[in-house]
């Protein structure tokens, strides 16, 4: 039937409403279009009700309201207490203490038995939005941290394990004098390293080393750590960027309260994101060099030495794979924008550790390459999976932060 | 939402089946008041309650569920019998329906006086729109929503709002009165009750630092003042956003599912022309208003500022070329490591402070994409697009340049470029959509039996005159819907003689199927049907079906 209908559907509704009284309907047919529509409206007026959202809409709206209203309290927490602990699962409880400031208490437990319990106070809008203060205190337990010896020529079979517990507390202030570009950061924290017998298949470091051959072994060390950073940051966000860069120098002073293991360290970091073809590709480059100096008559303990290996630097090698007094890391990624929420990347990492600063060159670097996938928001990396292959095998990295 | 709509269609279909043809035999095809010019709103809607759609829900729904949506192919359901959209609380026929002067279009939705910017009293943040702003009272105490320009487009965002409100008003939509004005921080006060919502969910007093946080992110003039666009507070009670599918269950006058309202489907065409990429419900608003002594729900396109490339950030190129998420482009880039290029990666844009990422060279109205597709967007048919294209085509070059001039751009070259792009995009819309269906318009049958009509595509200069037009004539029984073939006549022009033997009795009907023998446009061979009623000695057009329901249109998408 050809529907000539003006407002055919509306008339149909009228008929539906009066289907039970067909005879009357036929005798009381409206004689104008206007009357037909008005009849349908009159029928609808008898069954009005507020909008009823579907179950999915209710659920998602509830989540949205919770996030937008800033009333989120309980949240998942996936950070490990220490690098190398494997997949960690935990929870946090966030309590707003003022319009912008909050305290977040959280904890996690990893597949390797690493444990974390900490609380952090965050004041993100100090000095008219020029400064951010973080005050953190907590306790961590790392049960099987690898140690392979010093230098870049160690082999996997040299692995020994150590473990430690660590109460810690400190504060860090970041200051942006011009609100962008120039960044200054300073911090102080106190941490107590208490080594203990490790878990896991590899033998304990005590099997191969003595306090004389491995500085720091068998000693409890309490550090008062101060740090200062000056940097230039042109990225929109450190959590996710497709252009801009960061260039900074950080100086550390580790003072051992017992004056046995005090040292200083300087980190030089350069990051640059080079957009290509309207940011659909990005060449991301990073260089990070760390150098240390021991204080007079003191030694640098093995567990505090610069290191390479793990999910954010030499990804094809296990965490803490290479340690020595100095380190150099070079990373390059070719990032591909797949869509607004998802990037892939092809990457190459190279690095070395060395006893002498003069040895920090590109000779003898350990390297890996791989492929990554990252889910992100405009300003943060939500989830990252990297598959990295190095000479010691292929490793899978899961992280909730950018590699750089 | 989808379930409710399908449920309604099922009920309609089931009931029609159960009732058989007796119902239709009881009602005429054409009522004596056809075609109506205004959609009746007979019931009091004062019971309608505020209802918002969550933005995350809407985005998730539109990006995840919508791609699997299969357009119904149904003809728009709010049409009168001559294939036009009657006036309503949604839409008012303006351009294309009557002659609008340039002065009228330039005035647009404005009925009141502009704001008095001598001082502003801030009392709240701005709750909508892509760019930073505040809600404030002007020197006369009237409430306005102020929006600033981003620093990288120092005149474009505010200019876009002003221009777009005039365009969408002329197209027929309810629009907010918007003015370009200035904001001098030296003449700003905070209302003692002014508050701002904080991350902890509480509202605390608005401070200088809050204002500074806004002003640091916007374009500042050399004299320390700011260019702003001021939107007047809408009258009536605000009910929240309207949805692009289903009906309001608390509005008795809202009978046509929104995805089947032609003016909402047509936003796909108007959006493509103006690059209105942010088509989400959050940019719409329903209000309760008194009209003719009755409370009715009025529907507004509240925020049309995401036009002319102004929804893009400085480093955001894919808007208007892709939805926020598309499986096809995602897979393409994933598999090719990004080597399979999309148009947005190489398209050239005019670089000027007044112009966002807006261009006309590679613009294709069928492949234009808003951030997220709505159901009404998905339901656009070729006849809807044809209707919309005729309205776009009604904007003359002179009119477009006058509208762009209201953006008050300091760069005359940029103003010209913006108008040129709009003209170029308009022409592409005409070329795409006018020939896509049988473009017969304005059929007239005079008392002597001479049928005259126009071809919108030929008149617009986007198609050649076909060699022959054919008209198949029928006597039409308005009570039963039955037809009796009379004859077929033809002509090389848009005037065709009727056969002898047309009814001469008042109240009788004839139907005429008008088609064109065009080799270039196959769609023109499908006849459009016109219905005429004998009124005295004259014939009155009472019906026009460009694509009848039993001949579903291809979706107007590619």
Image (spheres, grey):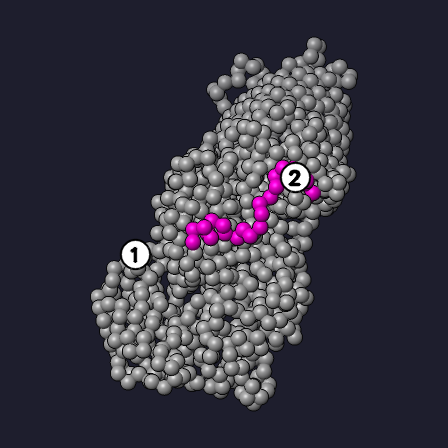
Circle 2: element type: strand
Q: Could you say where residue B136 lies in the image, as x and y percent from the top left?
A: 65, 43
Residue that lies at the very extreme toward the top in this rendered image? A296
Q: Are marks 1 and 2 on the same chain?
A: yes
Chain holding disc 2:
B
**Can the viewer see residue A145 in this picture?**
no
Residue B541 spot, x, y in % from top left: 38, 74
Q: On the image, numbered disc 2 is attached to which residue? A: B120
Residue B450 lies in quadrant? bottom left
Quarter holding the C terminus of chain A is: top right
Tell whether position B102 is magenta. yes
Label 1 Cα neighbours within 10 Å, binned few <14 / some 14-19 / many ≥20 = some
Q: On the image, numbered disc 1 is attached to which residue?
A: B462
User: Image quarter for residue A183?
Assistant: top right
How far across and how far down the image is residue B459, in percent?
Answer: 30, 59
Q: Is residue B107 magenta?
A: yes
A329 or B265: which is nearer to us? B265
Mark 1 and mark 2: span between their CA atoms? 50 Å
Count of numbered tags:
2
Q: Which quarter of the figure has residue A52?
A: bottom right
Could you say whether the residue bearing mark 1 is in a helix, strand or loop?
Answer: loop
The magenta-colored residue range is: B101-124
- Name which residue lies at 72% across and 21% down: A225
Q: Chain of mark 1?
A: B
């Amino acid at each position: 039937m050809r529907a000539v209908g003006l407002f055919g559907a509306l008339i149909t509704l009228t008929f539906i409403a009066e289907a039970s009284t067909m005879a009357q309907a036929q005798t009381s047919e409206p004689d104008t279009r206007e009357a037909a529509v008005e009849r349908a409206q009159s029928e609808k007026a008898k069954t009005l009700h507020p909008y009823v959202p579907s179950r999915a809409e209710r659920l998602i709206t509830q989540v949205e309201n919770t996030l937008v209203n800033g009333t989120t309290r309980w949240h998942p927490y996936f950070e490990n207490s220490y690098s190398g602990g494997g997949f960690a699962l935990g929870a946090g409880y966030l309590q707003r203490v003022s319009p912008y400031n909050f305290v977040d208490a959280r904890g996690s437990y990893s597949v390797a038995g690493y444990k974390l319990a900490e609380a952090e106070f965050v004041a993100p809008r100090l000095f008219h939005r020029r400064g951010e203060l973080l005050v953190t205190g907590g306790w961590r337990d790392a049960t099987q941290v690898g140690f392979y010896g010093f230098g870049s020529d160690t082999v996997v079979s040299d692995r020994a394990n150590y473990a430690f517990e660590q109460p810690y507390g400190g504060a860090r202030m970041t200051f942006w004098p011009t609100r962008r570009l120039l960044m200054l950061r300073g911090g102080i924290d106190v941490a107590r390293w208490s080594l203990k017998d490790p878990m896991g298949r590899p033998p304990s470091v005590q099997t191969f080393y003595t306090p004389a051959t491995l500085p720091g072994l068998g000693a409890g060390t309490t550090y008062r750590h101060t740090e200062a950073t000056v940097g230039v940051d042109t990225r929109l966000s450190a959590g996710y960027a497709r252009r801009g860069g960061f260039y900074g120098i950080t100086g550390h002073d580790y003072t051992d309260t017992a004056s046995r293991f005090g040292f200083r360290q300087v980190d030089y970091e350069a990051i640059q994101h080079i957009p290509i073809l309207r940011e659909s590709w990005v060449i991301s480059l990073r260089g990070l060099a760390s150098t240390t100096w021991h204080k007079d008559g003191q030694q640098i303990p093995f567990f505090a030495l610069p290191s390479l290996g793990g999910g954010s630097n030499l990804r094809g090698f296990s965490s803490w794979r290479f340690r020595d007094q100095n380190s150099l890391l070079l990373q390059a990624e070719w990032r591909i924008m797949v869509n607004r929420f998802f990037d892939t990347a092809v990457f190459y990492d190279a690095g070395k550790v060395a006893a002498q600063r003069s040895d920090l060159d590109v000779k003898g670097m350990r390297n890996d390459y791989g492929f990554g996938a990252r889910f992100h928001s405009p300003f943060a990396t939500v989830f990252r999976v990297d598959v990295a292959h190095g000479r010691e095998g292929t490793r899978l990295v899961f992280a909730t932060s950018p590699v750089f | 939402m989808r379930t409710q709509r399908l449920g309604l269609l099922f009920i309609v279909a089931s009931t029609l089946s159960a009732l058989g043809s007796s119902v239709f035999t009881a009602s005429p095809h054409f009522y004596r008041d056809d075609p109506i010019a205004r959609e009746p709103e007979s019931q009091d809607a004062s019971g309608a309650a505020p209802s918002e759609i969550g933005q995350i829900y809407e985005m998730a729904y539109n990006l995840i569920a919508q791609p699997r949506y299969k357009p119904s192919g149904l003809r728009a359901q709010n049409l009168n019998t001559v294939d036009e959209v009657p006036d309503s609380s949604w839409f008012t026929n303006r351009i294309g329906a009557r002659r609008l002067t340039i002065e009228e279009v330039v005035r647009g939705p404005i009925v009141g006086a502009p704001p008095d910017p001598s001082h502003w009293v801030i009392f709240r943040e701005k709750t909508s729109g892509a760019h930073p702003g505040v809600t404030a009272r002007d020197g006369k105490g009237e409430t306005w929503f102020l929006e600033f320009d981003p620093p990288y487009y120092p005149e474009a965002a505010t200019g876009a709002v002003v221009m777009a409100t005039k365009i969408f008003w002329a197209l027929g939509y309810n629009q907010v009165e918007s003015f370009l004005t200035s904001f001098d921080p030296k003449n700003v006060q905070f209302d003692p009750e002014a508050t701002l919502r904080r991350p902890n969910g509480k509202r605390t007093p608005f401070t200088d630092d809050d204002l500074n946080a806004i002003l640091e992110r916007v374009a500042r003039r050399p004299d320390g003042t700011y260019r702003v666009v001021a939107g007047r507070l809408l009258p009536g009670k605000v009910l929240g956003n309207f949805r692009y599918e289903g009906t309001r269950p608390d509005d008795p006058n809202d009978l046509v599912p929104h995805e089947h309202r032609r003016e909402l489907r047509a936003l796909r065409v108007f959006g493509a022309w103006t690059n209105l990429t942010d088509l989400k419900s959050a940019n719409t608003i329903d209000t309760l208003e008194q009209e003719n002594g009755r409370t009715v729900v009025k529907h507004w396109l509240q925020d049309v500022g995401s036009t002319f490339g102004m929804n893009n950030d400085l480093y955001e190129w894919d808007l208007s070329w892709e939805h926020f998420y598309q499986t096809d482009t995602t897979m393409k880039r994933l598999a090719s490591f990004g080597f399979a290029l999309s148009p947005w990666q190489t398209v050239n844009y005019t670089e000027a402070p007044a112009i966002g990422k807006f261009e006309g060279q590679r613009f294709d109205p069928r492949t234009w994409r808003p951030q997220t597709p709505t159901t009404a967007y998905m339901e656009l048919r070729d006849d809807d697009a044809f209707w919309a294209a005729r309205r776009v085509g009604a904007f003359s070059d002179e009119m477009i340049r006058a509208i762009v001039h209201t953006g008050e751009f300091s760069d005359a070259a940029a103003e010209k470029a913006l108008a040129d792009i709009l003209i170029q995009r308009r022409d592409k819309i005409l070329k795409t959509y006018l020939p896509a269906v049988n473009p017969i318009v304005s059929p007239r049958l005079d008392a002597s039996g001479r049928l005259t009509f126009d071809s919108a595509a030929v008149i617009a200069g986007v198609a050649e005159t076909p060699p022959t037009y054919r008209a198949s004539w029928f006597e039409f029984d308005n009570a039963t819907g039955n037809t009796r073939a009379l004859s077929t006549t033809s002509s090389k022009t848009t005037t065709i003689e009727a056969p002898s033997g047309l009814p001469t009795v008042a109240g009788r009907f004839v139907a005429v199927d008008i088609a064109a023998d065009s080799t270039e446009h196959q769609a023109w061979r499908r006849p459009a049907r016109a219905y005429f009623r004998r009124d005295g000695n004259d014939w009155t057009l009472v019906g026009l079906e460009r694509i009848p329901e039993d001949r579903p249109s291809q979706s107007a998408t590619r």
